Image: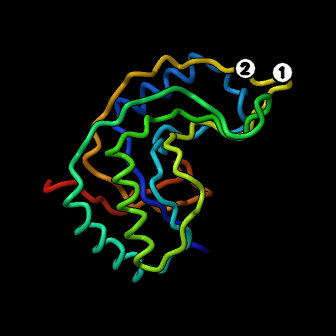
């Protein structure tokens, strides 16, 4: 079995609960084929894929040194959006505003990954939290606001996550990395 990993910003538990409760009050449970488990809400910085354990150890050492110079910051929630067709979205997500601090963090993590010789996704960074997958209703998708815009939370750590596709929740944090001198 392959081990897939990614580096991401975790969300505070109260915010995960608020997102989940708001979703339940906004959409029917069958609107999308697959709802993301609330414990799995996160903001991916870099997807790593299948990486050998010894390569992960080297990457983590490099990240720990690099992240000392990246101070904690606050993230602002934006609005919901979709990837895919307007009437049949593939992904339903909650956006995050791309601040200079977030962009710096993502670039620092990306550079560490590249310096370790690991391949990375070349798509532009679009900060979002995946909430659901695959529109499931016969009627076309219609945008609904969750009313979560203007919420903020502090980012003081990131995690290396491992994916377990057959489990729920499917993402397991296996290493925590602190920002700044924390």
Lateral position of residue 65 relative to residue 31, left or right: left
Q: Is residue 131 above or below residue 167?
A: above
Quarter of the image holding residue 66? bottom left
Disc 2: CA contacts within 10 A as few (<14), some (14-19) or many (>=20): few
Give the image location of residue 181, x and y in percent. Answer: 13, 56
Foreground residue among 141 and 76: 76
Give the farthest residue toward the bottom.
Answer: 54
Q: Is residue 5 above or below residue 44?
A: below
Give the image location of residue 70, x and y in percent. Answer: 24, 55
Q: Quadrant of the N terminus?
A: bottom right
Helix, strand or loop at mark 1? loop
Give the farthest residue toward the left.
Answer: 181
Contact? badges 2 and 1 (CB < 8 Å): yes
For disc 2, the marked residue is: 142
Give the image location of residue 32, x and y in percent. Answer: 71, 32
Lateral position of residue 149 relative to residue 85, left or right: left
For disc 1, the marked residue is: 139
Instruction: Identify the residue at horizontal 47%, vertical 80% (top origin).
Output: 117
Q: Is residue 73 above or below residue 161?
A: above
Give the image location of residue 115, x and y in percent. Answer: 40, 77
Instruction: Identify the residue at horizontal 56%, vertical 24% (top origin).
Output: 23
How is colour applied across the structure in the image? rainbow
Instruction: Identify the residue at horizontal 47%, vertical 28% (top origin).
Output: 78
Foreground residue among 41 and 119: 119
């Amino acid at each position: 079995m392959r081990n897939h990993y990614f580096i991401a910003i975790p969300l505070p538990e109260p915010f995960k609960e608020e997102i989940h409760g708001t979703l339940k009050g906004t959409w029917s449970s069958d609107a999308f084929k697959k709802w993301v488990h609330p414990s799995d809400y996160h903001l991916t910085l870099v997807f790593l894929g299948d990486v050998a354990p010894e390569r992960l150890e080297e990457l983590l050492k490099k990240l720990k040194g690099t992240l000392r110079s990246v101070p904690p910051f606050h993230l602002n929630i934006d609005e919901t959006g979709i990837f895919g067709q307007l009437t049949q979205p593939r992904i339903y997500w909650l956006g995050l505003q791309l601040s200079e601090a977030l962009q710096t963090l993502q670039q620092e993590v990306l550079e560490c990954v590249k310096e370790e010789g690991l391949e990375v996704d070349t798509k532009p960074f679009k900060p979002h939290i995946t909430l659901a997958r695959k529109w499931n209703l016969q009627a076309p998708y219609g945008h609904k606001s969750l009313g979560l815009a203007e919420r903020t939370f502090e980012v003081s750590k990131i995690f290396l996550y491992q994916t377990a596709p057959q489990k729920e929740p499917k993402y397991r944090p296996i290493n925590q990395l602190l920002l700044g001198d924390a």
